Every structure is written in structure tokens, then in C-alpha cells.
Image: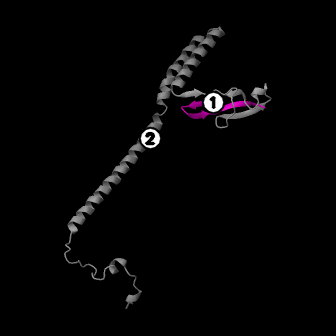
């Protein structure tokens, strides 16, 4: 029926012509039980490793979601005393006609807020009179330099820039001298 010459040849069968398929060489004993046990052991290890990896993925995903939910909790807890101070200052200065009292309470709260944010890693940029750096600053406009030494340098700061640790979280908006 079929021509045997057209069948593809299996390299494993033709490697050793002295042995026919399914035959063992002299002195070989069938060791299928040991091979089966080793195969079962490797399969068990593989399944355990796969299950352990799936558990790890689920656990880290759950931890990441929990971290996002509570990421700001520490900062908010640190800012609550400042909010309390604002409420007390507002209540105390509602009826006072003395502007100096209001200014003083605002200054106290501003300093407390600045210290709290600094403890959390927020650092303001010092930019006035320095060189312009596009990685740190955003140039809003250019004006004629008031003096020759401020030519090409930062003349004014419109909005402060801040670092959180080593990372810039807000670029300083500056005015350059021409």
C-alpha cells in the first residue's frame, strides 16, 4: 500500500542499527520503576515550585494594593497637628482686629508645616542667582539682566521647586536675565 521509501526517518532509530526499537542491549535491565519515581519526584517539585510562585505573585499584588491604600497615611498623620493649629488660629483670630496677631499665627503655622514636611524628606530648591538647569528649572520668561553678573542666570523665582529625597517633584518656575 504505502511505499516505505517515502516515510521520514527517525534519527533515534537509525543511530544504532544493532538494536531494534524496543530491544535492550545485553546486560541492560529494565529500570522503569526508578525512572518513574524520579519523574514523579521532578513533577512534584515542579508543581510545588509553580504553586509557590503563584502564591508569591498573589501576596506581592495584595501587599502592593495595601501599600497604595495606606501610602499617604504617615504623611496625613504628621500633618494633622498643623491642621489643628490652623483651626485654633482661625477661631482665635476671627474676632481680633489686630493684623499682627493674624500674621504671627500664620507664621507659626507656616514654620511648623515646613518643619513637618522637611522631616518627611521635602527639600526646597535654592535657585535665585544660580545657573539655569533645564532638569531642575522651568523658564517662564526672560527679562533684561539688572547687572552683568546675572546675565544668563536666574533673576527671580515665580514658584518654588522641591526635592523629595533626591528626586525633583516640582520644577522651579524661574525668570532668566538676558
Return the residue at label 2.
64
Could you tell me residue 149's position as x and y percent? Answer: 76, 27
User: Element type at marker 2?
Assistant: helix
Q: Residue at x 47, y 37 (%)?
A: 68
Q: Residue 176 colored magenta?
A: yes
Return the residue at label 1.
161
Q: Quadrant of the N terminus?
A: bottom left
Of callouts 2 and 1, the N-terminal one = 2
Q: Residue at x 59, y 19 (%)?
A: 110
Q: Residue furthest right?
A: 144
Classify 10 Å Cα crowding around label 2: few (below 14), some (14-19), many (20 and above): few
Could you tell me residue 71's position as x and y percent? Answer: 48, 34
User: Element type at marker 1?
Assistant: loop
Query: Depth check: 11 or 116 in front?
Result: 11
Could you tell me residue 168's position as x and y percent? Answer: 59, 34
Classify 10 Å Cα crowding around label 1: few (below 14), some (14-19), many (20 and above): many
Q: Residue at x 29, y 55 (%)?
A: 45
Query: Depth check: 60 or 144 in front?
Result: 144
User: How would you classify the magenta stretch by its main secondary structure?
Assistant: strand
Q: Which residues are magenta?
A: 161-178
Amino acid at each position: 500500500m504505502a511505499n516505505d521509501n517515502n516515510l521520514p526517518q527517525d534519527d533515534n532509530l537509525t543511530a544504532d542499527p544493532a538494536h531494534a526499537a524496543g530491544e535492550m542491549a545485553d546486560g541492560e535491565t529494565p529500570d522503569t520503576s526508578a525512572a518513574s519515581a524520579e519523574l514523579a519526584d521532578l513533577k512534584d517539585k515542579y508543581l510545588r515550585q509553580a504553586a509557590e510562585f503563584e502564591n508569591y505573585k498573589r501576596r506581592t499584588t495584595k501587599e502592593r494594593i495595601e501599600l497604595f491604600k495606606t501610602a499617604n497615611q504617615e504623611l496625613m498623620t504628621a500633618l494633622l497637628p498643623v491642621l489643628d493649629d490652623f483651626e485654633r488660629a482661625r477661631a482665635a483670630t476671627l474676632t481680633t482686629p489686630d493684623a499682627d496677631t493674624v500674621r504671627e499665627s500664620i507664621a507659626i503655622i507656616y514654620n511648623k508645616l515646613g518643619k513637618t514636611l522637611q522631616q518627611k524628606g521635602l527639600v526646597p530648591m535654592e535657585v535665585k542667582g544660580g545657573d539655569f538647569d533645564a532638569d531642575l528649572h522651568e523658564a517662564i520668561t526672560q527679562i533684561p539682566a539688572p547687572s552683568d553678573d546675572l546675565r544668563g542666570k536666574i533673576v527671580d523665582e515665580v514658584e518654588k521647586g522641591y526635592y523629595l529625597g533626591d528626586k525633583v517633584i516640582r520644577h522651579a518656575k524661574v525668570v532668566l536675565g538676558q
